[in-house]
Image (tube, rainbow, N blue to C red):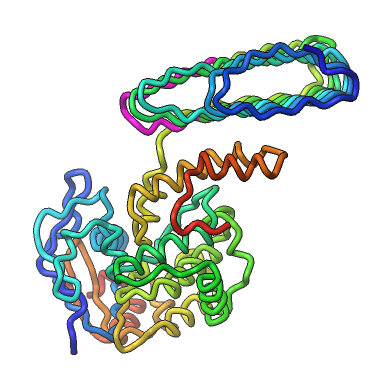
Amino acid sequence: MKALLEIKDLHASIGGKEILKGVNLVINEGEVHAIMGPNGAGKSTLSAVLTGNPAYEVTSGEVYLKGENLLEMAPEVRARAGVFLSFQYPVEIPGVSMTNFMRTAINAKRAYESKEPLSAKEFLALMREKKKMLELPDKLNNRSVNEGFSGGEKKKNEIFQMAMLEPCLSILDETDSGLDIDALRIVAEGVNKLKTPHNASIVITHYQRLLDYIVPDFVHVLADGRIVKTGDKSLALELEEKGYEGL
Amino acid sequence: MKVCKGETYERVFVNEEVNLNIEQEADSHVKIHVINAPFSITVNQIGEGCSTEIYGLEHLRGEDDVTAETHVTHSVGGGTSNQLVKFVLEDNARGRFIGDLKIAQDAQQTEAHQTNRNLVLSETAEMRTQPQLEIYADDVKATHGASTGQLDESALFYMQQRGIDKEKARQLLVNAFMREIVDTISDERMKELMNERLLNAIDGVVE
């Protein structure tokens, strides 16, 4: 089994306040890891630090993606190297069309991989293919990025972008929050369809519900900035029953 | 100058300083764009049922120092006016917007809007905004808004997270900000030309 992501004793803070206090985690190709934990445990901080959000400061520790030092890469380089974050709150960008945005992103990744850019025709064909695969409506294309989208549409749009960019490591940050059961099913099925033996996912969630649809290989409990317990999917059920205090 | 009853005056001025003083007779229409040049435009609706649209777009760099002035008066009722002026300021640029909107006592059932939005991209650039509204009629619909801000950091990070480098992400956001004005140009050929010139063609753009 090949290690995709290695996190070693990671400490991070925001505004001088330490949030991550020594996280250790190894994720191999083909694995799905769920990270659960109470509010304020550092779940979203972990996703922000892995993607290079400038609001957070890494104070010590190391992170490697396929053996390369992830923390030294700019956020856009991490993305091109295959780290994808499905945002908890996808950002609205008025005036920037989805098509323009997505094509710029795809071609930036292709340039990083020394591939030729996609022509307009190839790009549109790829959009259609991915939309069909995810059973998404066509109407998203000509709108501005996330502008006026409902909560469910925004999350579906995140998964669509994930399908387009084919990341090796997807981080789904509270993807289930604010979704009704139908939207949750579509999003989860999308994630499952995109799973291959060579990519991996981190599913950050507060509730067990999403894990009925995206079945994790490992469940980690993050509390007060550290992983305090690791188990298989039964741990999620146990948490649901007993709560985090019951650990 | 006078725009006669029922007539339309429509112009797009680019890189050309504009000083206009216009009187509009009944049912006449005025639509003016000024792009990248100082301007002072005074419009007085002296006949009923007129429409006035004034759009300004100033992308300032270096030591640029530009003032945009609008003075719109509704002397009689039943007219509409819309003013939208946007500045993008880089380097040490200075911008100034002075916008007067006056609705006279007899100008009932007027609809008037004035908006000034500015994007300040450097710490040494400076924008001053002086909107002034005088409304003497009571049965009118009038709005005005002014805002000066920076690029949305969360939008920049969102784009970077998709692999778009920061400089290109900035360019996409600035272009989106400017496109709102370009989109209001009626002449399709001119609109296309402005899109090419202002929104300096970005790799990978498909419309």
Q: Can you say which quadrant of the picture contains the N terminus of chain B?
A: top right
**Is residue A121 shown above or below A92?**
below
Name the residue nearer the viewer: A203 or A199: A199
Q: Picture quarter containing residue A153?
A: bottom right
Residue drawn where x is 40% and y is 30% of the image: B120
Name the residue nearer the viewer: A48 or B179: B179
Q: Picture quarter containing residue A204?
A: bottom left
Q: Can you say which quadrant of the picture contains the C terminus of chain B?
A: bottom right
**Is residue B183 shown above or below A105?**
above
Q: Does the magenta portion include A210?
A: no
Across and down, in percent, residue B70 comes to 63, 17
Whether residue B189 can be seen here: yes
Residue drawn where x is 17% and y is 55% of the image: A12
**Is residue A91 shown above or below B66?**
below
| Left or right: A119 as drawn, with respect to B72 | left
| Span highlighted in magenta in the image | B118-130
Q: Does the magenta portion include B122?
A: yes
Residue drawn where x is 30% and y is 80% of the image: A200
Across and down, in percent, residue B88 comes to 46, 31
Name the residue nearer the viewer: B88 or A39: B88
Residue drawn where x is 51% and y is 62% of the image: A154
| Left or right: B29 as drawn, with respect to A131 | right
Across and down, in percent, residue A124 comes to 55, 71
**Is residue B70 shown above or below A94?**
above
Name the residue nearer the viewer: A232 or A64: A64
Magenta segment's dominant SS is strand
Q: Number of labelled discs? A: 0
